[in-house]
Amino acid sequence: MTAKSSGISPSRVDVYVRSRTRKDGSIVNSAAAVVVERIQEKINEGTSSGNLSQAASWSNDVFAQVKGPERRGRVRCVGAVQTRSSQESGPSQPVQNTEELKGLKAKLAAFEKLLETCLLPIY
């Protein structure tokens, strides 16, 4: 599953498994094979008990259960710019800036209108 084909970003498990699988389907080394096997076991346990990984909580998803807790300031299999706090937080900074910009534009328009009404009698 890719973000381009489905519009949904792949999970950390998908990224880990795909990045450690060769084109012929074999796993790149024995350590990765052990982790992939444990991931498959956890996924099978989750589907049989009806409790598949919680994608919203990285601290308790299948990948974290197999690989252990994250090191401070890092989130594995997500990329260099992502952190747990940025992924699980509320509105992002650009959204807040956009809302503030809209408010400032409205104030500016009101001031321009006020200035026009004040200067109109002078000219």
Image: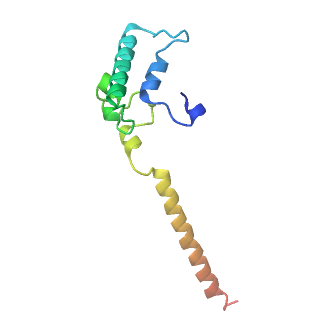
Query: Which quadrant holds residue 70?
Result: top left
Residue 65 image point, x, y percent: 30, 26
Residue 92 image point, x, y percent: 45, 50
Q: Residue at x 57, y 77 (%)?
A: 110
Query: Which quadrant holds residue 52?
Result: top left
In this view of the protein, which residue sits in the foreground, 72 or 119? 72
In this view of the protein, which residue sits in the foreground, 69 or 108? 69
Q: Which residue is drawn at 50% across and 61% down?
A: 99
Can you name the residue that lies furthest to the right here? 123
Quadrant of the snapshot with the C terminus: bottom right
Q: Can residue 91 be seen in this view?
A: yes
Residue 102 image point, x, y percent: 54, 64
Q: Which colour scheme is used?
A: rainbow
Left or right: 82 as drawn, with respect to 65: right
In this view of the protein, which residue sits in the foreground, 122 or 112? 112
The vertical placement of 27 against 103, above or below, is: above
Residue 93 image point, x, y percent: 46, 51
Query: How many labels were placed on the picture?
Result: 0
The vertical placement of 32 against 122, above or below, is: above
Left or right: 60 as drawn, with respect to 109: left
Q: Which residue is drawn at 37% across and 20% down?
A: 39
Q: Residue at x 37, y 27 (%)?
A: 47
Q: Can residue 63 be seen in this view?
A: no
In this view of the protein, which residue sits in the foreground, 56 or 102? 56
Can you name the residue that lies furthest to the bottom here? 121
